Image: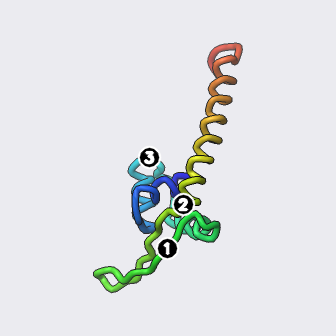
Amino acid sequence: MLVLRVAADGETYGYEIAQTLELHGLVDLSEATVYTSVKRLEKQGLLTSRREIADNGRARRYYAITAAGRGEISQRLASWDALAKVVFSVFAAGEGGDL
């Protein structure tokens, strides 16, 4: 869901996705994990990609979210919200104070 959300802001590449997530506090995320995720999301039709040669002569793959990807974000966010409500409810109702 986080990779899709970053891609929703505009076309991006794997390293940039990893850097954005790190900037927001996800510091233990490896670039390999990001690349695995974008490949899986592309295979599912939630992202598209294009290859471009960068100024330094190296190829870079840029990713963009699809309409299906935007729908997936909405669906996953609703699921996350429902789960968060349950978690907060269980902790609020817990007996015995500190854990």
Secondary element type, mark 1: strand
Frontmost residue, 49 versus 29: 49
Is residue 79 toward the left or the right of residue 3 in the image? right
Q: Earlier in the sequence, mark 3 or mark 1?
A: 3
Disc number placed over residue 25 in the picture, else none: 3
| Front-most of residues 74 and 6 | 74
- Indicate left or right for 12 with 74 as reference: left
Q: CA distance from mark 2 to mark 1?
A: 14 Å
Give whichever of 97, 1 is nearer the camera.
1
- Label 2 sits on residue: 67
Camera-near label (3 vs 2) is 2
Q: Which residue is mark 1?
A: 49
Circle 3: is it few (<14), some (14-19), or many (20+) Cα within 10 Å?
few
Query: Residue at image x 44%, y 60%?
Result: 17
| Residue appearing at x 58%, y 60% in the figure | 68
Q: Residue type at mark 3?
A: Gly
Q: Nearer the viewer, residue 67 or 6?
A: 67
- Picture residue at 60% right of the left edge, 36% below the top: 81
Q: x, y (%) of residue 32?
A: 54, 67
Q: CA distance from mark 3 to mark 1?
A: 26 Å
In the rendered image, the vertical position of residue 50 relative to residue 38, given as above or below:
below
Q: Quadrant of residue 6?
A: bottom left
Please state which of the two labelled residues, at mark 2 or mark 1, is closer to the viewer.
Answer: 2
